[in-house]
Image (spheres, grey):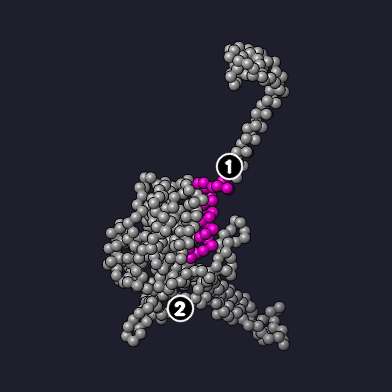
Amino acid sequence: MFRLRTVGFGCAGPLCVSGARLLWWGYKERDLHRLARQRPWWENAAIFAGLLCFIQVTSMCYYFGNRMYQAWRPSGNTLYVNKAMDTKVFARPDLSVAAVRMVIHYVLSGTQTPFGAPMVYPEYMRPEAEELMKFIFDLHSEQPMFSIPDLWAMLSAKALARLGGPNISVRRGRPDPPGHLAVEQLLVETPSLVPEGKRDVLKMKRLLAGQGFSVEEIVGMIGGIRTIGFHDSSGFHTKEEVKPQIRRHPSLMGPQEDVFHLPETMEKCTLDPYVFGGEYFDLLLDYNWRQRSLIGWRSGPFRCDEKDRKREITLLDPFSEQAVMRERKRLQAQEQAREAVERAAQKREQITLPEEEKAESAMGRVGEAQFIPGVEMQESVDDDTTEAVGSLVVPEFKSPCSSVSMREMDMMLLDDALLTGWLHRFSTNEIRFYTVFGEVMEKIQNRGYNLNSLYVPT
């Protein structure tokens, strides 16, 4: 092995004044080559193994040190951000509804600032908006590499996916709001220019068309926010009524059984206000919605009656109806096959059975087919089949009129022929509705920013 030479007089650090020495080594350069050629193979192998062990140990120290530092002070940790947001939206579906509605409210309020700087919310959604803002600000303080507008975009996309809506590819790269803005100024209350209790379709079309939205996107936008959540005038806040919990299993998240409870109220447009879907368009087009009159004055929400329909009702669970029809067809085919076999057997018996054998039996049967005296004749198979068909239970159709109601904002979509046409289109093609609403969400999230500066993380 090499021997280190003690640095003596005339040397400055590892360098010596004499040129006959190689750094601080005690041998000349030609002596080192000679010693390397004379070194045995096992010594070279030991040196190589020592270098490999040194590299492995240093790599492991760096890896575990980095893990400990990220746990203590995470910075730019995408997995940490996604896990925190998933836990938040799965634990509180009302916050998911509020996050999606706040994105659409950004357009309905006519806000001209870039998205998320500041974030706007309607008056009736103050508790949810303040809680979401606190969550976003705490997450930004832990993950400073994620800007506040980026966190708002990521949270709203995850909230929409949690409710069953389309998946959105969130672009990142939005800058943080100006530093002189306080935390209170990052969340602003703004009134909606398309209120729930007004039925002014012309004003709504002018507002949204002036911002670059087509008729298809207008209907998809209004239908998206009316599908989820409760009416604005209800003043309902999901605090005590709905208490979902995270499952104890680490790989599954979501509310446990018998924990997620919906309030018994009619102040909603769909049967389940925490599920995104196209049920809203079906209910709006299936029934005639009317206001209750009180002393000649109509007011309040619009309600429907099961006897007052516009078109034939399709069961909300079409698979149950398909199963019933399939079972009926199977039983009918079985009955027809049995009748055909009986007719063929009777015809063959009439041809092959002699007259003298028929006379031997009072019932026209001989051999093992003789009836046993004292035993009553069993019911025919025809009766059994008839009873089976009659006992087939058809699932009862539960009318949604006792659970939902509409407001003037919903009736506004029926006042315009173009809007009504897209209602029918979305009612028959739910995938189209999902696509349009996802494009609207992406367009709103990118407003006020240069698309060339935004990127989709891989």
Say what amino acid the circle numbered 1 marks.
Asn
Residue beneath the point at 62% across and 38% down: 61
Q: Is residue 347 visible?
A: no
* SS under mark 1: helix
Locate residue 94 relative to residue 341 in the image: left or right: left
Range of magenta residues: 69-96
User: Which residue in the protein does label 2 denote?
Assistant: 402
In the image shown, does 411 or 385 lie closer to the viewer? 411
User: Which residue in the protein does label 1 denote?
Assistant: 66
Residue 75, percent from left and from top:
51, 46
Does the magenta segment cover residue 331?
A: no
Does the magenta segment cover residue 84?
A: yes
Residue 81, percent from left and from top:
51, 52
Residue beneath the point at 68% across and 29% down: 49
Up-down relation of residue 75 to residue 298 (above or below): above
Up-down relation of residue 134 to residue 261 (above or below): above
Residue beneath the point at 47% across and 60% down: 132
* SS under mark 2: helix
**Are discs 1 and 2 less than 8 Å apart at CB?**
no
In the image shown, does 35 or 398 lie closer to the viewer? 35
* Secondary structure mostly taken by the magenta-highlighted segment of the chain: helix
In the image shown, does 44 or 143 lie closer to the viewer? 143
**View extreme (front): residue:** 9
Residue beneath the point at 39% across and 65% down: 122
